[in-house]
Image: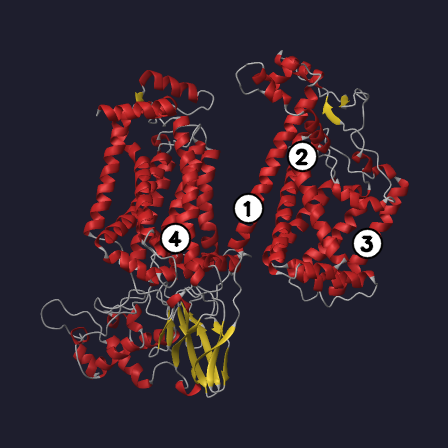
Amino acid sequence: MDTVLFVVFPYVAVILAVGVGLYRYFSRRYTYSSLSSQLLENGKLFWGSVPWHYGITLILLAHFLAWLFPGVAASILGSGTRLFIFEAIGLALALFAAVGLIVLIVRRLPTNSRAGSVASGMDWVLLIFLLIQVFTGIGVALFERWGSLWYLSTAVPWLWSLLRLHPDTSTVVALPGLIQFHLVWGFAIVLLFPFSRLVHIFAIPLEYLWRPYQIVIWYQEPRRADQRVTAAGRPPSPPQLETRVFSPAGDQGSRSTDAAPPPVSFLRLPSLLLKFIRPVGFLPLDSFFSVLRTGCSHLTDPVASGEPLRPVASDEYLRSDGHKRMPEDLQRRSFLSKMAIVLSAIGAAVIAVPSLAFLLGLRKSPMVWRAVGKVSDFQVGQTVEVSFADPSSLPWAGITAKTAAWLRRKSEDQFVAFSINCTHLGCPVRWLPDADLFMCPCHGGVFYSDGTVASGPPPKRLNTYPVRVNNGMVEILASPLPITTTTL
Amino acid sequence: MLWLKKIWQWFDDLTGASKTAGWIVTHPVPRTKKIGWLYVFGSATLFVFLVQIFTGIALSSAYVTGSGQAYDSLRFITMTPVGRVIRGIHDFGASAMIILIGIHTIRVYLMASYKYPRQMNWLTGTGLLLFTVLMAFTGQLLRWDQNGFWTAVVAANQAGRVPFIGNWLGHFLLAGSTVGGATLSRFFAAHVFFIPAAIFLFLGLHLYLVLYNGISEPPKSGEPVDPRTYRARYHALLSRNGVPFWPDAAWRDIIFGLLVVLIIVGFAIVIGPSKLGRPPDPTIIQASPRPDWYFLWYFALLTLIPRWSEDWVIVLGPLIFALFLILLPLVAPHGERSPLRRPWSLVIVAFIVILIAHYSYVGHLAPWAPRLDAKPLPASVVGVSIGPIADGAKVFYDKGCEFCHQVSGLGGIRGPDLSFVGDRLTRDQIATRIFSGAANMPSYSGKLTQQQLSDLLAFLASRRRLPPVGPAPAGFHTAKDAATN
């Protein structure tokens, strides 16, 4: 099974991905795109696309670079502080991506009009696959701490061994199930590559870097006419599909355009790194520069003319200024407000992630052997309470640092140490030597002297601690407080 | 007093206080006629919350948040005369908050004030109810005596029943793998910072909504809420028949609130705070953890439900209750408000109130808990002081039978009362039960010597009803007869 999951499946996935990908490139090149739906629904797209792409790109980059240069990664992460900061940033980015992905999924729901109605079955499969991968990744980050470090000695050797065609699964077969799932699922997504819109990763819109910016919007005039018609009581006509492209240069002002940019050959792969600098076509970086050029004159104008400062509703502002400048201003204002919210969210994340990490971080206490008395102190067939120091105790724990157990000497050389916690809800069980029973004072659970349930609500026998005899001393392996998990 | 007025005018001029916030004081509220006193519980909860804040701040100035020192610092607080009263106020205040918020919830539910447009009032109130319960729970834990310590363990074990993440969640609550130095700090932070912060947030919204949507008018049969017309009708009602909140409605709030506060302080002085139990030393096995009264019913419920349903109840029970509260205003935002037209609301309230009252009583008795503090039966009960019956009574005590079985009013009440077991069962039948045990009784097979068994049987067979008056009828066995058999 391990061979199938960690050797056969990855090879199948990669071979299919490359094969079908090449076929699709040479036969249907113009499907190498991610079929933009910006024109259909732009608001949620921003909130989904930007967090998702920035988050996942950086996360993937980290996975990729650590795989490429494990030595460098190990030396960078060698210090605890750096490791912590790195993990915290990684987790923040993953959450960022997860939020974006959820927004993108919500946007594609059938009830969400336009973007939902054009979602194909494969879009849905892909979204769900990505969602699962992101959440298992977050799960790994939260529950299997310091993945960036152990990744280097587990998954990285395995991936390299696959690349060298000498598969070696020894470093991954013993990993916890969640991590193994994450690894295999990654290859499942590789498998989806050529069948889905993921191919757009290789259609890098490099010319976005230098071409004048374009803003694709619904043409405004027909829409207003629509509203008037609706007000007059006639059914509204479907939205006009005519679009206009506005440009600061002014020379392309009325050219209609396709929303999806023509793809660029993925043979220009060296430009991959540039892709990471300017990953998303949807973020209006260009309008950011246009803001820098024009400044905030519309805010200062009323003051200069002596009018009192008052809030300007955006539609009112548009009407008084005419629609010629409108799209640019609208775009700038919407960009500024989005930018402010994104920046605030980043600021909040910077504070929240380390705080949450501190809160969620559990001290994993070492398991230590604690001596509880000489072998000769205990009589065969007797059960007595022994106390010892809790391994996880802090200096200020005081008397709570103590722990107790019921130690029974079964024979000359056999001891058993029962946890004092009832397996029902954790109350301390009492040993009644004459009755030869443990009784719980909370809900009346009763256990026999060997720890099995005699009566009452406990779902299972008393927990035990490992015991050993060392140099004539009885020692108990001090372990975490046993918690009875669900029996469902 | 002129100077006071001048200071106010100066302040008001600079801040605009009366212009911006003055309407809050005098905003119109519906005339409540006879049922005005039903509207005081929300404000009384708020008053007690303020009491809790002040006494809580006072307590926190002396409380030491360390697992090793908290108990001693609390003992110190309790020993000072004022500290004892402050602790008492905080303690009775907690009980008062639970009671008042419960009554307030019931009042709002019965009057269906959660319907349009006050759904959000109800939802924020649901949050406040939940947070209040959490405050009560974390608060009893902060007492950090033996009871508080084991409360933490029991909480972790209940959290452990959540599927998949149970173990992690349980240890997250304990802030480590065992109860130790970090545990108390975690619950302290929750009780003093996290939950109060959430309460402030929800309370602010709740009060704002009370002003924004207006206090609900007394319900009338035959006047269902219709979202399309409700606001207009409500405003017409206010302009036709409204009275200013201050002082026409507020005087009742003030009087009832003062009464509540006085009762709390009176109890705190006369009765004092909950006694501190033994120190939180996990090695002291002589512990019988019990929750404070507001959770006794839940404690009882968890014991008495069928075993197979336990995980479901622990995990789904609170979830379903919360879901009921959340869904209520969403699925029933319109329609009749009068409880007379909503008889099921009366049934539900009666059911919940009776359930909680009954199980609180049962939880107080805790009949399922073995009475591990039972004393050996005195000779007056046994009837003789030597012989097999007396020896049997000793076995009855030594083997733990008496912890669960009552004889002549002494001992536990988990199992059947054995005061007259000799009338019901023969010796053989008794012996069979002792050997085989039952769902709630361990088997004593192999735990008794032949001698002990015959003594025990002699003792139990002698437990017979004595005749009220007159000589013993034929066939009647006294304890002495049984002993000579």
Using residue A244 as the reference point, say whether residue B327 is left or right of it. Answer: left
Using residue A191 as the reference point, say whether residue A403 is left or right of it. Answer: left
Residues B479 and A438: in front is A438
Viewer-nearest of discs 1 and 2: 1
The amino acid type found where label 2 is placed reads Phe
Distance (Cα) linking label 4 and label 2: 42 Å
Viewer-nearest of discs 4 and 3: 4
Residue extending farthest to the front is: A304
The amino acid type found where label 4 is placed reads Thr
Residue beneath disc 2? A46
Circle on res. B138: 4
Please tell me whether mark 1 sits on a helix, a strand or a loop. Answer: helix
Viewer-nearest of discs 3 and 2: 2
The amino acid type found where label 3 is placed reads Val
Residue beneath disc 3? A14
Residues B92 and A85: in front is A85
Give x and y (percent) for residue A156.
74, 61
Distance (Cα) linking label 4 and label 3: 54 Å
Which numbered disc flags the more N-terminal residue, 3 or 2?
3
Label 1 and label 3 in one chain = yes
Which picture quadrant has residue A252? top right
Label 4 and label 1 in one chain = no
Up the image or down, B47 lies above or below A258; here it is below
10 Å crowding of disc 4: few (<14), some (14-19), many (20+): many
10 Å crowding of disc 1: few (<14), some (14-19), many (20+): few
Residue beneath disc 1? A351
Up the image or down, B236 lies above or below A477; here it is above
Give x and y (percent) for residue A379.
40, 86
Q: Is residue B401 visible?
A: yes
Residue at 48 percent across and 53 percent down: it is: B315
